Image: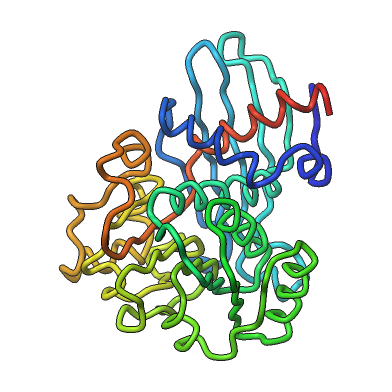
Amino acid sequence: MIRLDFTQLHEIASVEALIEPVQLAFLHGANVPQRLHYDIGNEPGDATLLLMPSWRAGDRLGIKIATIVAGNSARGLPSVSAQYLLLDAKTGQFLASLDGRALTLLRTAAVSALAASLLAPAEPQELLLVGTGALIPYLASGHSAVRRYTAIKVWGRDKNKAAATVAELERDGLPAEVAEDLEDAVRSSDVISCATMSDKPLVLGRWLKPKTHLDLVGGYRPTMREADDDCVRNACVVTDTLTALEECGDLRAPIESGALDAAAIVPLERLVRDSALQHPAGPTVFKSVGVALADLAAAQWIVARSHTA
């Protein structure tokens, strides 16, 4: 059985390279049962166990086993820990074990980049990254792969972490700088990508430009919010999986308040397949919670190339 660790995955794959295989996965589909999640901490939200399977009959089957522990940043540990198992769906034989954290970082940013390629303004000038966690540099790479930016700003509550993130992006050749004030940065940005664990809205709709594309990645529980109701009120809203309508506060709360019509939310697979829905004229929002279909596509692509790496 092939075993690929965090470093080996990054030697084989990049966010940019995974955009096409992820797009093809959403185009062709797969079996994706509802993921299972369990609270394993002392209080709800302390720690979560996720089980995320997906398969194509007669081809490949994969499952990710992941934990999300919000308090790990204070321990100097990553919030997400995971392993991914790839199997032969016809014989049930185990084929590969991949570092699930690396896979999650790469495929999450690839999915956001895919959505942005179909929703974001054609010629944006400024990208704003909200957050300073491990996913932010990957999102910067993904968004920069599908659009060209003259400025990339990073906002975080901890200015030292924001500065460290900017330094990392600059080493990658990106035009990055620290955003001192969140409202000012939102008002001047064409695309905004959020990856935080905030429990209250950070981005307010009244700050947004008329055609802003908002990429919401961080919130994965009903109590978590990165954007307020006004951000989605008159926007074209897309999500990677319709389970987000129940699981995520950024969709569930505005649906409950009446600011968002659940029936109008577009699944990403439909957006990929229907060119008439792509490149809408007004504001757009993409809510990502993570879907096993993307894990399977990324894992298959990486394992296929591991034989020649």
Q: Nearer the viewer, residue 287 or 85?
A: 287
**Vertical relation: 93 (above or below) 21:** above
The C terminus - image quarter: top right
Residue 173: % across, % down: 75, 64
Q: Nearer the viewer, residue 58 or 34?
A: 58
Residue drawn at x 53%, y 36% as measured from the top left: 22
Location of residue 298 by image quarter: top right
Render colour scheme = rainbow
Q: Which residue is found at the position 19% from the left and 71% from the top?
A: 257
* Count of labels in the image: 0
Percent across and percent down for residue 137 are 67, 62
Quarter holding the N terminus? top right
Position of 70 relative to 180 (above/below):
above
Position of residue 88 relative to residue 99, above or below, is above
Left/right placement of residue 280 relative to residue 136 reads left
Residue under the image location 76 percent in, 72 percent down: 75
Horizontal and vertical percent position of residue 31: 42, 26
Along the line of sight, the residue nearer the viewer: 93 or 43: 93
Q: Which residue occupies 68% across, 87% down?
A: 159
Q: Is residue 157 left or right of residue 242?
A: right
Residues 268 and 247: in front is 268
Q: Position of residue 40 (x, y in %)?
A: 57, 57
